[in-house]
Amino acid sequence: MKPISTCLWFNGQAEEAANFYVGLFENSRITDVARWGDTGPGEEGSVLTVAFELDGSDFMALNGGPEFTFTEAISFVLNFDTQAELDAKWEAMTADGGQESQCGWLKDKFGVSWQLIPAMLTSVLNGPDPDGCSRAMKAMLGMQKLQIAELQAAYDG
């Protein structure tokens, strides 16, 4: 048993969201779908929860209703070695109503917040050259989707 998993609260979109996320990540799959029975309160046969794995991490999508929504207070962080990988996920996650934000942040079409971060970011924001770090930080603050080459160029001066 894995000690920690994540539950995401949706308003009727649990199955759609789980399928979307499983389609975005390799080594991912739906593991279980629980449906309402005749005792409700949901409509009999409609989805209550969807259990799924994203590259080895366990998640549950719950159709809990409209009472709660997602905020930027919690986000999922993805690290990328290449710009092409980052770009592909960014495009997929901002499609169909997703929203770009600043400094590598976005909301997907369900309102879930993600940070798409180049693996090299720490080295240019915390490297041995304080002036380079300052330039890289300034460059990052002006970006929505992070650009590896531009961050490195800013650090290098």
Image (cartoon, rainbow, N blue to C red):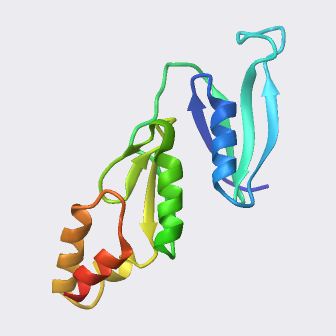
Residue 34 visible within the image? yes
On screen, residue 146 versus residue 29, left or right, reads left
Residue placed furthest toward the bottom? 128
The residue located at (80%, 11%) in the rendering is 44
On screen, residue 84 versus residue 155, left or right, reads right
The residue located at (46%, 71%) in the rendering is 83
- On-image quarter of the C terminus: bottom left
Q: Quadrant of residue 35?
A: top right
Front in this rendered view, residue 126 or 99: 99
The residue located at (82%, 38%) in the rendering is 32
Q: Quadrant of residue 45?
A: top right
On screen, residue 60 versus residue 89, left or right, reads right
Front in this rendered view, residue 54 or 90: 90
The correct choice, above or below, for 39 with respect to 119 in the image is above
Q: Where is residue 39 shown, x and y percent of the image?
A: 80, 8
Front in this rendered view, residue 70 or 144: 144
Residue 5 visible within the image? no
How many numbered discs, if any? Answer: 0
Q: Where is residue 125 shown, x and y percent of the image?
A: 29, 77
Q: Where is residue 99 shown, x and y percent of the image?
A: 39, 42
The correct choice, above or below, for 99 with respect to 2 in the image is above
- On-image quarter of the N terminus: bottom right
Q: Where is residue 116 shown, x and y percent of the image?
A: 45, 60
The correct choice, above or below, for 104 with respect to 155 in the image is above
The residue located at (51%, 19%) in the rendering is 66
